[in-house]
Amino acid sequence: MEEIKPQLIKITFDGIEVEVEPGTTIMQAARKIAEADESQGHLVPPAMCYYKPLPTSGGKCRACLVRVAQGSAKDPRPMPKLVPSCITQVQEGMVVENTTNPAVLDTRKSIVEFLLINHPLDCPVCDQAGECHLQDFSFEHGSAKTRYEEERRTFEKIDIGPFVQLHMTRCILCYRCVYTADQITNNRVHGVMNRGDASEISTYIEKAIDNDFSGNVIDVCPVGALTDKTYRFKSRVWFSKPVDAHCDCEKCSGNVTLWYRGDEVIRVTARKNTWGEVNEFICNTCRFERKKTSDWTIEGPTKVKRSSVISANKYRADVIKKPDFALKLSATQFKPIDDTREYTTDIDTVRHQSIENNDKANHRSLLSRNN
Amino acid sequence: MAKKILTEHINVPGIETFEVYRKQGGYTAVEKAIKTMTPEEVVEEAKKSGIRGRGGAGFPMGMKWGFLAKPEGVPRYLVCNADESEPGTFKDHHLMKCIPHLLIEGMIVSSFALGANKSFIYVRGELMYVIRILEKAIEEAKANGFLGKNILGSGYDLELVVQPGGGAYICGEETALLESLEGKRGNPRNKPPFPAVKGLYQSPTVVNNVESISNMPWVINNGGDAYAAIGIGRSTGTKLISASGHIQKPGVYEIELGVSVDEFLNSDEYCGGIRKGHHLKALVAGGSSVPILPAHLITKTAAGEDRLMSYESLSDGGFATGTMLGSGGFIVFDETACIVRNTWNFSRFYHHESCGQCSPCREGTGWMEKVLHRIEHGHGSMHDIDLLVDVAKKIEGNTICPLGDAAAWPVASAIRHFREEFEWHITNPHEATQPGAVFMGAVLA
């Protein structure tokens, strides 16, 4: 029987035309552009919560909001609000603006700010540093200073099971681990408790997570909230060498990436694709217990990914490819929008200002005490 | 006397019982609809009536019913949203408590129109006694053959379930309500798909407010055109207004849409004016989430026309000089109310009630609350005001559900209209933090 191919849908993304299958999301269409032409990688909207291997994920972080300038060929009206590109399906003739629209970039900048206000920014001691999606996201779209003066929310570190540690303070509530636990393990072992900025990923009365695939929550976590206890503080990502390897495992595919430091395997993770998404989930035995070279058949060095610091000069400003428009915008328009405070790097001025501010605060507290 | 549709018989003694309600003409709409009309005709009447959703958004109810997908072999559901938790709104509570059969009758008619055989009333968990009242009413209706199998011998079955909510404001958002009803965490869903296509248990679902559904018996009895004749323009029918704050007679009033704000505020039939010796300072016209209005924009629009209690007139001038009718939570402030403190209080509410699913709302509501707290307690600085405006702007429109907008609007509008008061708090922290201190405007400045 002849296979019936679905009619392809043509959309325009940042001025580039692309043909995709019906049911594709805007994000996937953008990724298709980038996969065809690597120099267009910067066009792809960032994804903090969306994770392709986990169906129904996405739509929560709002980092990938884009503007739809034309809904479809039939109904050319623009969509009234920015839409999350990770879950919005394409329509024939849709015109999407991502890096070409100032409102989108402005919103994205504010999303970085929102995600960071309750984030501890303890990258120097965080195991995730170097492969952290939030780090990449804030480097590419955020600003170097904060307007947040209040206390950040904090949580105690919790050990969930023998291998995984939860450091909720770093969590950005992307819900990826919740979906992982829901979809690839037998029981729903953990979920989200409480509301608003007090909500936390948690297990039922600090119950340990105990099943063969629980380690995958570490891989899907975009930040350092869920970390591998066998790898904790062993090394920095950029000091280790990734090597593809496989083994015969009765539980999973056995296709992994080994992270070497010298001759020692310090960490085992699942293999990830260009977008930082796991190709195949692996079992806990492979991840936590097979840490000798003799356990594995080595395939060769891992092709270094777009999101890895191991690719040289990842964080040099002149290497980052930004559209001219964004550069222009960040240079001229962004600074004066809302912040009237003056920033200086001159140490004496800073010291003087801080003394002055302290005096003011003391004066105020004196006043309130006198009442 | 103005036209009364919902509260006509509300003061009849014993109206909460089936016998008295029946004597007052109750359940005639069920008889009329089920015996003489087809479901399509009922939907047509709802469309003709032009009734708009009374929960806050004001979306035409008939149109919403028209969107309901009707695939073969899939059940359809009607869900009544009785999770009324908006600060300043208490109309549904009053209606369900006093005249529960009206809602039950409306539910039967509406479920019949939509072809739903199982319908839900999702009641705010705090209102346990109302749930008992409703359950009793359902029992009575069932005993008299208006609910259950084969209603009035027509072959139409309907089961009505009252479900208590867990006590979260967010569960008043329709998709969060459906999640909660399914027994999950009350997180709003991404739209599309809309509930009319995939709602409760992935089946087509209509979610309507208590007041909207309670209007249906009257619409069936008197016809959609008669309903559309009441009111003004596209704001048809009557509306329950929950009046509170510094007025002589707080309470729930049924008004014909199109009554002027001045009349509603000052006539003895309604609020009876501001409390003695004080004058109007500000008004929140539709529950805490709508923009606040300063005194000079309340009775007159910016163009100098009389402002009416209708969807169109209240939103005249957009958010720059207008507001919204919302859910009808009419909160009046006299000059003793501190706008900064009030804004902080609203903000605290939204911070507490944000579900924490999407980042702008989760982080932004908390941020705004903390900054407002600082200003209110005399530790603010001038750039905090611009910061609040900017944060509110960044939350608005970027969230999954309208809670983000609802959190941003009161803050943005308070600063838009009462910026001087915020500045006074910042420049005079000593005076502003005195108990009961309120900015008196240019008089003291």
Image (cartoon, grey):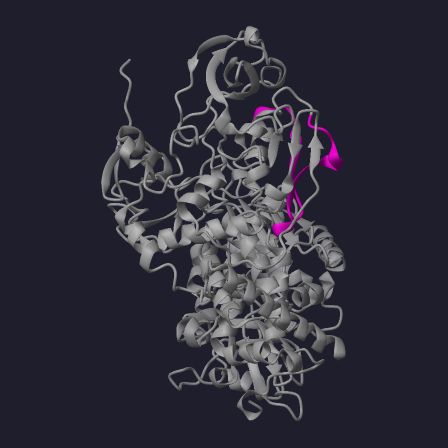
Q: Which residues are magenta?
A: A184-209
Q: Name the foreground residue: B16 vs B28.
A: B16
Residue B96: x percent and y percent?
67, 63
Q: Name the foreground residue: A111 vs B117.
A: A111
Asked if residue A74 shows in the view, the reply is yes
Residue at 54% in and 78% down: B423
The reply, left or right, for residue A1 in relation to residue A152 is left
Is B260 magenta? The answer is no
- Considering the image in quadrants, where does the N terminus of chain B appear? bottom right
Residue at 59% in and 58% down: B366
- Considering the image in quadrants, where does the C terminus of chain B appear? bottom right
- Displayed quadrant of residue B343: bottom right
The reply, left or right, for residue A124 in relation to residue B20 is left
Is A187 magenta? The answer is yes
Asked if residue B3 shows in the view, the reply is no
The reply, left or right, for residue A177 in relation to residue A140 is right
Residue A136: x percent and y percent?
44, 39
- Displayed quadrant of residue A252: top right
Residue A280: x percent and y percent?
49, 20
Residue A48: x percent and y percent?
48, 40
Asked if B32 appears above or below A187 in the picture, the reply is below
